Image: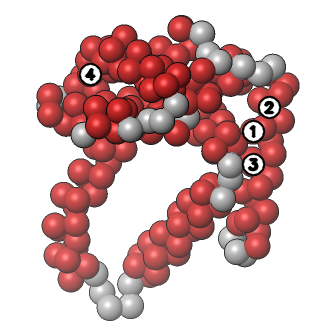
Amino acid sequence: MLTAVIAAIEDENDRSLIESLYTDYYVLMLHKAQSMVRDRHAAEDVVESVMLRLIDRIELLRGCNRASVRSYLVTCVRNEAIDRMRREKKTQSLDDAEERLRKLPDESPQLDTSLIREEQIQAVIKALEALDDRERLALRMKYYDRMTEGEIARLFGMSRSGIRNVIDRARRHVGAQLQEGEWI
């Protein structure tokens, strides 16, 4: 499937860049994924997912040096592997969800609290989805990947103060979205 998607990229330079990233970094990405998910097929799926998402971020990658691209790819694979493990864990726990719900009392405050928490999480997800790609990626790198502003700035090809402005603006946008929904 991936080769068909890459072949369908209209711009020759974009297609060439994605093919080059795939051939140059496939082994590294696969090794990182496999060290996390512990299954060759799952690791291949992780790498494929990352490569498909890279097509949408081609502009970001085009201006990066080789070390930054390598670091970015490893981070993307790590994040995708973590997301995959979370989804699998969630699927496994869904099998037990009905049994756990039966054990809760009818008027359980725990249930109310967990529903409110889930609504809050959904509100944050919605607020993050409203951001543009650059702001969302910068926030993810800062808070989820725990990258420094300097590392993020290098990947984006910006100054530290420039990336700090992007992150601050993104945080304000998320805060405003949550405030509109009365979650703050």
Q: Is residue 3 toward the left or the right of residue 154 in the image? A: left
The x and y percentages for residue 138 are 66, 36
Mark 1 → mark 3, Cα distance in angstroms: 6 Å
**Is residue 146 visible from the viewing direction of this image?**
no
The x and y percentages for residue 80 are 38, 38
The x and y percentages for residue 51 are 38, 32
**Label 4: how many residues lie within 10 Å, few (<14), some (14-19) or many (20+)?**
many
Q: Are marks 1 and 3 in contact (CB under 8 Å)?
A: yes
The x and y percentages for residue 17 are 48, 20
Give the answer, above or below, for where 83 lies relative to 177: above
N-terminal of the two: label 2 or label 3? 2
Which residue in the structure is indicated by mark 2? 164
Q: Amino acid at mark 1?
A: Ile
Question: Element at badge 3?
Answer: helix
Which residue in the structure is indicated by mark 1? 167
Image quadrant assignment for residue 180: bottom right
Q: Are marks 1 and 2 in contact (CB under 8 Å)?
A: yes
Which residue in the structure is indicated by mark 4? 30
Q: Residue furthest bottom?
A: 106
Mark 2 → mark 3, Cα distance in angstroms: 10 Å
Residue depth check, mark 4 versus mark 2: number of the one nearer the observer: 4
Q: Are marks 1 and 4 in contact (CB under 8 Å)?
A: no
Which residue in the structure is indicated by mark 3? 171
Q: Is residue 1 toward the left or the right of residue 151 in the image? A: left
Q: Amino acid at mark 4?
A: Leu
Question: Element at badge 1?
Answer: helix
Mark 1 → mark 2, Cα distance in angstroms: 5 Å
N-terminal of the two: label 4 or label 2? 4
